[in-house]
Image: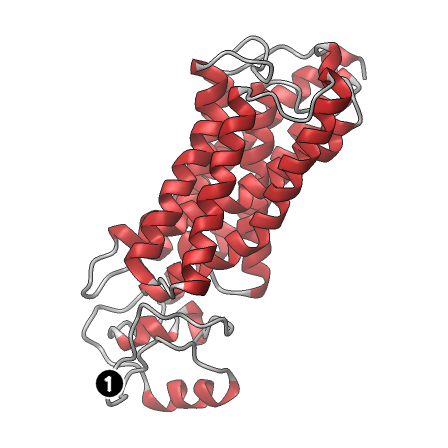
Amino acid sequence: MSAEQLAEASDYFVVAAVLLYVFAMVAFATELAFGRFRPGKKADGADAKRHAVRQPVAAGVAVAGSAGAVDAGAPSDTAFPALPGGATVAGEAEGQDGQSPGAARAGMVALVLAWVGWVANLGAIATRGLAVERWPWGNMYEFVVAICFAAVTAFLGTQLRHNVRFLGAFVMVTAALGLGLAVKVFYTAAGPVVPALNSYWIAIHVTAAIIASGLLTMAGVAGILYLLRGDGMSRLPAREDLERVAHRAIVFAFPLWTFAVIAGALWADRAWGRYWGWDPKEVWSFITWVAYAAYLHARVTAGWRGRAATIVQLVAFACLLFNLIGVNIFISGLHSYADV
């Protein structure tokens, strides 16, 4: 295939990924809306008890029938306790005792659509790279497409080990909106990049930033849901589960973001003859690093949990979004992407 054909195929892959993510979002939302029996029903005590013997229950989760609930603001690092049909122990404590067969099927269809959309997203990145014969994140359009791919990868990768389908609808809508924004606002025709970006460092520095951003996006989605969830019965999962997902994602992403900042400084020295020049992108990358470091520090030293920690995490997420998009649109500098 010629470069033009590959570039056109990449564009079609992006459109297909958007549609598949939207369909997956609808299926995930269907499962979330109709996947549990009405609040007020009690879980089958024998099933809950048998499962509790096989799998440890996270601290801070109230099991149905227990004498009292432990503080929900202190999640542990144990595995997510899942009951048959995808319900969690936390959900059982709120009187949601399982899934209907129809909702379970919707959840499985959603996962299949999400995986097919992930393949289409990957295809868009691969064909774009072949078309331009370089790493395909040399402009804002390519960068956003890659971050959406990383966010969905983080969700699907987590789903392989833990039942986090409750995040599916929200991660899918985030990815679909991100790809739609890339196509309608940031689109750049396939072509060469400025000489400073034509370096092997783009495969090191930008790749680390993309993977970290995908993980931090999933953590941000979980944090937003934490604040939106009410204190009473809800279709959303328990707050301790949402906080646990966010914390684990940040623990994985923070070293990657740290590496990306350091690699960026090394690349800057090679390209511009200095490690640090107070460029807006450099400044906001460091501000984002400090914000997430503050979140992790507050959890470890001050024991912050629950709403306070989530607010700090979302402030850091806002810094990340401004660094990834706002700096490139509103502030000019050496890191400004072409044709934005």
Return the residue nearer the eye: 315 or 225: 315
At which x and y percent is residue 63? Answer: 32, 82
Q: Is residue 160 above or below residue 16?
A: below
At which x and y percent is residue 184? Answer: 46, 16
Q: Is residue 235 above or below residue 220?
A: below
Mark 1, Cα crowd under 10 Å, few <14 / some 14-19 / many 20+, is few
Which residue is disc 1 drawn over?
68
Of the 4 image quadrants, the one containing the N terminus is top right
Asked if residue 259 lies left or right of residue 216, the reply is: right
| Colouring mode (rainbow / by chain / secondary structure / one colour) | secondary structure
Q: Amino acid at mark 1?
A: Gly
Asked if residue 236 lies left or right of residue 292, the reply is: left
At which x and y percent is residue 11? Answer: 61, 20
Q: Secondary structure at mark 1?
A: loop
Q: Residue at x 24, y 85 (%)?
A: 68
Q: Is residue 328 visible?
A: yes
Q: Residue at x 36, y 66 (%)?
A: 240
Return the residue nearer the eye: 229 or 323: 323
Q: Residue at x 42, y 61 (%)?
A: 299
Q: Is residue 216 above or below residue 49?
A: above
At which x and y percent is residue 120? Answer: 62, 34
Q: Residue at x 40, y 57 (%)?
A: 166
